[in-house]
Amino acid sequence: MAKSQLRPGLTLISTPIGNAGDITLRALDALRDADAIACEDTRVARRLMDMHGVSLGGRPLLAYHDHNVASAMPRLLDLLRGGGRVVFLSDAGTPMVADPGFRLAQAVIGEGIALSATPGPCAAIMALTLSGLPSDRFTFIGFAPPKREARRGFLRGFAAIPTTLILYESPKRLAASLADMAEIFGPRDAAVARELTKMFEEVRRAPLDALAATYAQEGAPKGEVVVVIGPPPPAEPATEADLDAALTDALATMTVKDAAKAVSTELGMPRREVYERALALRQR
Ligand code: SAM
């Protein structure tokens, strides 16, 4: 048998988000070779291992989730300090992406223990790649708060970010959440990706207001969803009148140099050009 590549330390294992065939060969090797397996839900991990013919043998299978960190973490750290090869998997997708694992990884790094991963499925990344929206810069913002006012405040905080946004949403709140997004972000292009990797995989691409109207009419979709929203349109270039107005304001309280610096940042214009105009305005 080939020598195991799994090294002492913690290895984070990404697992399928719907299609069992998406487990990687390295993930299966790691599950086979680990001295101990930590997971969000032991039943889900057992099912995955059974499906792929990985037996547990006499190895510990330990639950680690947001509600038992205090008891589970010391046990895992003891195994790791003793040179154990421990793997951690969440129920689906990549650990720590809207899933547990962060505090464990942080403790492992803090102790100087090796941390590695077998990368694989992640709903956010798959939705981004299928969305047709700009992917050179994107911001993953997790789940929006369920209550309307909190959600709207949360969304407002991301409205000016000049990147594509990705968020997870519950199907039953999808229509209301899309309506808030349409109001707060305007008619930006967006996509709703549903049931990724599964039989009824679907991606709907349309401006936010159209998607909000569709789901308001159809009701909650079945399955899991990811919402991807394109970046805001680039700001219109500043006109001469904008420049003069901003400089006049700034020159009321600042030196020419400081006013030029502040206004060139505010309007995204070259510092020298703004400085020359500030000088001219001051000399009037
Ligand atoms: N760690 C996971 C990952 O890497 O994507 C995410 C876990 S989070 C608790 C679950 C959320 O991910 C769901 O509510 C949904 O928004 C999204 N999700 C997971 N699987 C999905 C799928 N097959 N299709 C669409 N969205 C999915």
Image (cartoon, rainbow, N blue to C red):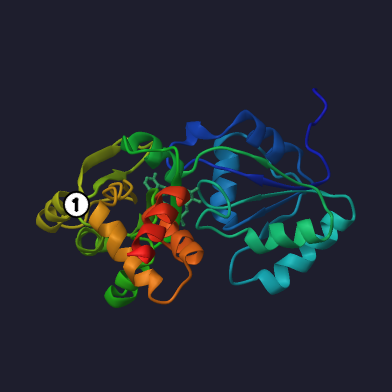
Does 199 sit left or right of 35 as displayed? left
Q: Position of residue 277 (x, y in %)?
A: 37, 55
- Residue 282 against residue 90 in the figure, above or below: below
Q: Circle 1 is placed at which residue position?
A: 187
Of 76 and 152, which appears nearest the observer? 152
Q: Where is residue 220 in the image (x, y as percent from the top left)?
A: 21, 57
**Which quarter of the figure is the C terminus placed in?**
bottom left
Give the quarter of the image for residue 23. top right
Write the residue at 77% across / 57% down: 108
- Residue 92 against residue 130 in the figure, above or below: below
Q: Which residue lies furthest to the left in this view?
A: 217
User: Does the rendering let one see residue 145?
Assistant: no
Mark 1: secondary structure: loop
Give the tally of numbered discs.
Answer: 1
Does 21 sit left or right of 193 as displayed? right
Q: Where is residue 8 in the image (x, y as percent from the top left)?
A: 83, 44
Q: Where is residue 40 in the image (x, y as percent from the top left)?
A: 58, 58
User: Does the rendering let one see residue 78?
Assistant: yes
Q: Which residue lies furthest to the front in this view?
A: 284
- Identity, as a three-letter code, of the amino acid under mark 1: Pro
Give the quarter of the image for residue 24. top right
Crowding at dot 1, Cα within 10 Å, few <14 / some 14-19 / many 20+, comes out as: some
Give the quarter of the image for residue 137. top left
Of 25 and 238, which appears nearest the observer? 238
